[in-house]
Amino acid sequence: MFLPAVLALFVLPLNAAKAASQGAAGDALQTVFRDGAPGFNSFSGLYLQMTLAIVALSVVLKVFRTIQEGRNNEPLEGMSHAANWATLLLLSSLELFYALAMGKDAAWFCNPYKAGWLWFIPGFVIFAWVVYNQLMCLANILADLQHHSQAEFSWKPGLYSWVGGLVCLVICQFFYQPGMPAVMGLIFLAQLVQAGVIFKNAAPAGGLAQAIIFILVYLIGTFAMAFLLIHFSAMLVFAAVAAIAFMVLGSGDGSYTVKKRERPKEKCPYCGASKNMDGTYNCTCLYVRRKAFKD
């Protein structure tokens, strides 16, 4: 009984991911990534307001992180702790809503044709800061939740599975696209296992409410973080290509002056001095003395 259950646990998510990537479900998924989800994409006109709200919530998270760093990274307590994880949960939920609403235009602020050539570089820098800040805050908040749950376990394998899975997805995208459903299934399976580990350890020690909060923050936070990293990796590729292009363009001497062609002048065969219009040379070498002696 145990072996079939284990096999089913591994096979069912893979088959579900494979089925979702093919047929009508696969077309619907591609439509969501391209045009946004039905019902959500009607809010795409609020892209600027949602973007500013994401930045504002990121600043609030930075404030909590600064407070925690001032306390030598000791866990936050009471209302500060609750406000911290609630802010992250709100930010992550807004980012997922934003992704479903915007589709492929989610990173519009890094597109010079949409944000403008003067704003897309600041947009890229701000986006990079949001990614880094949210990653650090997510790690801190998960550590605080584990502290308050009074349980000893590790939630890092779930995060590592995201990193490894995203790398494998990128590799499959370029070299073996049929393997992408299997990778997505393994990522989904890893998150289910991690959520089960959190519940199993946090619920008995910290209570059911603490375990549910922990799972919600972990799942929503990591899914939103994965969304940010996917878009940030695309922006990094764009930045690398742009940097290489600038290096290639700047490798020349920058001189495009067309020199006027001049008729080569006759020179003295002995010292290389130029020949004058009257047939004499601007030199006092042996050739001049020989010519004078002959004359």
Image (tube, grey):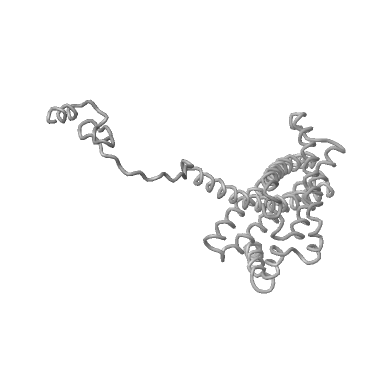
Furthest residue to the right?
Answer: 79
Find residue 274 and report its image quarter: top left
Task: Tell me where residue 107 appears, x and y as whole percent.
Answer: 70, 53
Task: Tell me where residue 73 appears, x and y as whole percent.
Answer: 74, 32
Judge from the rendering whether residue 131 lies leftward or rightward of residue 179; answer left or right: right
Judge from the rendering whether residue 190 lies leftward or rightward of residue 282; answer left or right: right
Task: Tell me where residue 29 appears, x and y as whole percent.
Answer: 69, 66
Quarter of the figure with the N terminus: bottom right
Looking at the image, which residue is at 58% across and 51% down? 237
Judge from the rendering whether residue 275 lies leftward or rightward of residue 69; answer left or right: left
The one nearer the camera, 5 or 253, is 253
Furthest residue to the bottom?
Answer: 23
The one nearer the camera, 77 or 239, is 239
Can I make out residue 153 in this image? no
Task: Tell me where residue 272 appears, x and y as whole percent.
Answer: 25, 33
Quarter of the figure with the C terminus: top left
Can I make out residue 136 in this image? yes
> In the figure, 242 relative to 70: above or below?
below
Furthest residue to the left?
Answer: 294
The one nearer the camera, 111 or 59, is 111
> In the figure, 71 relative to 93: above or below?
above
The one nearer the camera, 291 or 233, is 291
Looking at the image, which residue is at 49% across and 42% down? 254
Looking at the image, which residue is at 63% across and 48% down? 160
Total marks in image = 0
Looking at the image, which residue is at 58% across and 53% down? 167
Find residue 18 and report its image quarter: bottom right
Find residue 5 and report its image quarter: bottom right
